[in-house]
Image (spheres, helix red, strand yellow):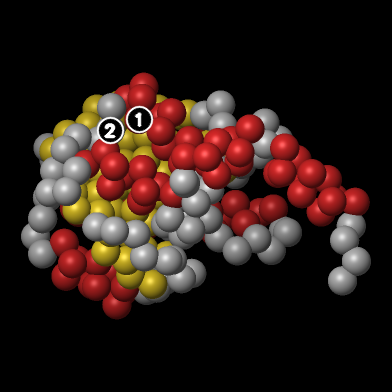
Amino acid sequence: MKRTRTSKSWMSEHVSDVFVKQAHKDGYRSRAAYKLIEINEKYNLFHENMTVVDLGSAPGSWSQVAVKKIGLKGKVIALDLLEMHPIKNVEFIQGDFRENKVLIEIENKLNNSEVGLVISDMAPNISGIKVVDQSAAIYLNELALDFSCNWLKPNGHLLVKSFIGADFDSFVDSVKPFFKKVIRIKPSSSRDRSSEIFVLGYEKLNT
């Protein structure tokens, strides 16, 4: 298939991207690592020996960051619909988070561990129909929130990738009753043209 001008432009930008170059240098699987690193530097989400659940983990850069931050006695459980090459000290599940059997598999791996942090980089397969894609993205956000309400320990955190559009403000409002603060974040490593934005539920309330 002949490349379009758009795909050529994207490739050119990708190759020259400072965060792509830094990811290669630092050994991260994607530039997305720096979004999590930047957010953590400001809000101190990780601590040693904690349990982290990484939703939408492939190719694995967020899990790479997590295992470095929590140490050998911590636990990272990662999930993605796509295959993810193994990462030392990360327990990976391949499956669809929308399916109940996958949720049960995560819960079995947790084995009643207290979860300190849920991070979600989940995004739907893009159809090109904005209203459909936005609705699908918000649904994944809601699933991550529901999981966090059930499994996060008091003062634990939820960080989810979302997208500005219909129902985004409603989703943010739905997070507020469960956390001390809800913060919208656009990391410097997030491309300007992207509508992605991160929602941080900071310090879960003991409800």
Check the image and report above or below for 92 versus 189. Answer: below
Q: Position of residue 66 (x, y in %)?
A: 31, 44
Who's the residue at 87% across and 61% down the image?
3
Location of mark 1 (residue): 40
Kind of residue indicated by mark 2: Leu
Kind of residue indicated by mark 1: Asn
Is 206 in front, or is 119? Answer: 119
Gap between marks 1 and 2, in whole Å?
A: 5 Å
Q: Secondary structure at mark 1?
A: helix
Q: Are marks 1 and 2 in contact (CB under 8 Å)?
A: yes
Is 87 in front, or is 174? Answer: 87
Who's the residue at 33% across and 70% down the image?
93
In the picture, the disc for residue 173 is none
Looking at the rendered structure, the number of numbered marks drawn on it comes to 2
Can residue 35 be seen in this snapshot? no
Who's the residue at 28% across and 33% down the image?
45
Among numbered discs 1 and 2, the one appearing first in the sequence = 1
In the picture, the disc for residue 45 is 2
Can residue 99 be seen in this snapshot? yes
Who's the residue at 32% across and 35% down the image?
201
Q: Dot 1, crowdedness within 10 Å: few (<14), some or many (≥20)?
A: some
Q: Secondary structure at mark 2?
A: loop
Check the image and report above or below for 24 versus 201. Answer: below
Q: Dot 2, crowdedness within 10 Å: few (<14), some or many (≥20)?
A: many
Q: Position of residue 144 (x, y in %)?
A: 35, 53
Residue that protrudes farthest toward the bottom in the picture? 101
State which quarter of the image contains the C terminus: top left
Q: Position of residue 79 (x, y in %)?
A: 36, 63
